[in-house]
Amino acid sequence: MKTVSCQVQSLTPLTTHVYKVLLKPSEKIDFIAGQYLNFIMTDQDKRPFSIASSPNSELIELQIGAFVADSYPMQVIERIKASQASGEAITVEIPLGAAQLRTDSERPLVLLAGGTGFSYIKSMFEYLAETNSKRSVVVYWGLREENAVYELAETTATLAKLGDAKFIPVIENIDKDSATPWQGKTGLVHQVAMQDIENFEAYDIYLAGRFDMVGAIRSDFVERGAKLEHMYADAFAYI
């Protein structure tokens, strides 16, 4: 891990509450897909965010969900806005985490995330596509409402570069009165995965989302054959 200063390249809303941040580090950064960084507010206040970009990218991408004014993530967004306006660099600690992609494995992959946990698995499937991986990959992304969806076309295009990949976004609460109702999968994302995959024993499984969600998925997937030694999530250190 090292401390690196970064210039804010761009700050873009992906939805009403989710922001895409691109940072240009002052030096080349080495990390493994699936790791995270600490955004340094002060020496005593360091806030973790998954890295959404591939290790091959020159820029560091973050996807930050900020739903409440003056919340933990919105304070970071406000700092980024101020840095962008002033040209002053922000500082990060990078890389961190032990749930990174195991690049020496050839096992098929389940990458499953809820909400902005998508950034964790995005780094992985982008890297896999860039390196022409031959592994089988299934990406599940769970969201509460359809208006929380972003970058569906971009994700589909990236995964299309892989020989054996599926992208399955899942909406928990659909708007039945919508003029253009959701045509994809609905319900809880991990339950949809369990409908699709009868036994998880053969898979490397990477998970991101709320701690309670990740804990429930771990229990349910183990009952379906998943091996703990082939399941990865930073949340496992806390639950």
Image: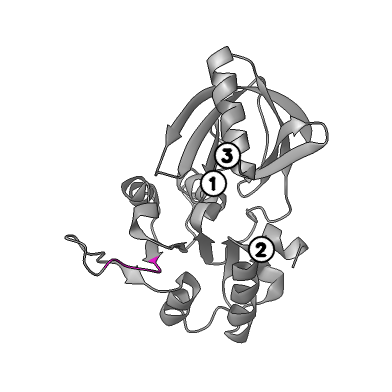
Q: Callout 1: 10 Å neighbours few (<14), some, many (20+)? A: few
Q: Position of residue 118 (x, y in %)?
A: 51, 53
Camera-side residue of 73 and 169: 73
In reply to whether residue 173 is colored magenta, the answer given is yes
Q: How many marks?
A: 3
Q: Does residue 190 sit above or below 126 in this rendering?
A: below
Q: Is residue 88 visible?
A: yes
Left or right, 132 with respect to 220, comes to: left
Chief secondary structure of the magenta portion: loop
Q: Over which residues does the magenta segment extend?
A: 171-175
Q: Position of residue 226 (x, y in %)?
A: 62, 78
Q: Which residue is mark 1?
A: 68
Tell which residue pokes out farthest to the right in this image.
44
Q: Secondary structure at mark 1?
A: loop
Sequence-wise, which precedes: disc 1 or disc 2? 1
Q: Which residue is mark 2?
A: 232
Q: Position of residue 36 (x, y in %)?
A: 66, 44
Q: Which residue is at 59% across, 69% downward?
A: 213
Q: Is residue 53 visible?
A: no
Sequence-wise, which precedes: disc 1 or disc 3? 1
Q: Position of residue 93 (x, y in %)?
A: 74, 34
In reply to whether residue 201 is colored magenta, the answer given is no
Q: Secondary structure at mark 3?
A: helix
Tell which residue pokes out farthest to the left in this image.
179
Q: Secondary structure at mark 2?
A: strand
Q: Which mark is residue 74?
A: 3
Q: Which residue is at 34% across, 54% downward?
A: 147
Q: Is label 3 or label 2 in front?
A: 3
The amino acid at mark 1 is: Val
Label 3 vs label 2: CA separation?
28 Å
